[in-house]
Amino acid sequence: MKSSRRAATEAAVIGFLLHTATVLWAWRTWGTFGRGNVISWLDLPASIGYMHLDGGPFLAWSLAAGGLQWAGIGALVALLVGRAARRGGKPSSADRPPEPPLAAETSVHSIELGVAPEEALAALTRAVEGWGAQIEATADGRRLVLPVVSGLRKGLVAGPVTIEPLPEGSRVVFRAEESHLVVQTAAVAILLLAGAGGVLTVLWPFVPQMLPVAPFGALLALGGWFLVVSRLRTSGPDELLAAVAAEAGGAPAAL
C-alpha cells in the first residue's frame, strides 16, 4: 500500500509538470486564443476559465486548477494500474517488496569520553531514548538501530555498538553495517513545483506575456524554500555520539 501511494504521488507530480510545460508552451506559441481552442478540450478548468477570464488571470487559473486536475488524473491512473496488476496476480514494480539493501562498506563512528564505561553506557542509553533509537541485546553484545535523516533522504542505520575502556575514560564505537535510506517523495515534489515557480519568475523579462504569473511563480519558489530547503538537516551517527557526550557531561577523554 505504501508503494502504491508513492507511485500515485510520482504520477501526480509528472501530470502537474507536464500540464505546466504544455500550458506555457501553448501560451508562448499561440497566446490565449490558441491556448483555449487547441488544448483546453483536454483541460476542464481551462475550458471554464476561457469563458470568463483572459490574459494573465486565465493563464494563472489554468496553471493552478488545470495542474491539479492532471495531478489527480495521474494519481488515479497509477492507483488503477496498481490495483489491476494485483488482481491479475502480477504485482507492478511499484507494489513489489523493496529489494534488500546492498551490502556496503562498514562505516565506523566513535567518540572518546572522560568517564568510566558504566557512565558512558548510561549516557548512551539516555541519548538513545531521547533520539527515538533502539538498542537490542545480541549474542555478541549490543546492536543499535538508529533513525537517520540526510537532506532529502531518511531511513535507518543499524550495527553493533560497543564501549571500550581507556586508561583515562572510555570510547563509544558504533559500526554502521546496515542502512536503508529512501528519498522523501513529498519534499521532492514540492521542490519540483518550486523550481517551476522559479522558472516562471526569471523568464518573464524575456517573455513579457508571463509577467502576470510571475508573482505566482515567486510564491511557489518561496514556498519550496520555507517548506523544504530551510528545513533540510543531517541527523546521523555522529550527531548521536555528540548527544552521548552531552549526556556524559560533555567530558572528553583526557589527553
Image (cartoon, rainbow, N blue to C red):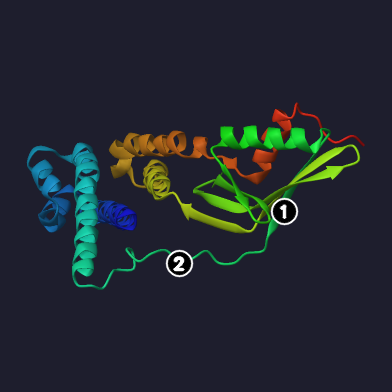
Query: Mark 2 Cα within 10 Å, few/some/many (few <14, many 20+)?
Result: few
Q: On the image, numbered disc 2 is attached to which residue?
A: 99
Q: Position of residue 132 (x, y in %)?
A: 53, 38
Nearer to me, 240 or 151: 240
Q: Position of residue 203 (x, y in %)?
A: 39, 46
Q: Residue at x 61, y 37 (%)?
A: 128
Q: Position of residue 60 (x, y in %)?
A: 24, 40
Q: On the image, numbered disc 1 is attached to which residue?
A: 108
Q: Secondary structure at mark 1?
A: strand
Q: Is residue 222 above or below residue 88?
A: above
Quarter of the image containing the C terminus? top right
Nearer to me, 245 or 92: 245
Q: How many marks?
A: 2
Image-based side of 246 in relation to 185, left or right: right
Rendering quarter of residue 86: bottom left
Q: Earlier in the sequence, mark 1 or mark 2?
A: 2
In the picture, the disc for residue 194 is none
Image-based side of 4 in relation to 198, left or right: left
Q: Secondary structure at mark 2?
A: loop
Image-based side of 189 in relation to 160, left or right: left
Q: Is residue 46 above or below residue 85?
A: above
Query: Among all residues in the image, which is located at the extreme front?
Result: 139
Nearer to me, 53 or 196: 196
* Residue type marked 2: Glu
Image-based side of 59 in relation to 98, left or right: left
Nearer to me, 250 or 27: 250
Q: Residue at x 57, y 56 (%)?
A: 179
* Residue type marked 1: Val
- Spatial separation of the CA atoms under disc 1 and disc 2: 25 Å
Q: Residue at x 26, y 73 (%)?
A: 90
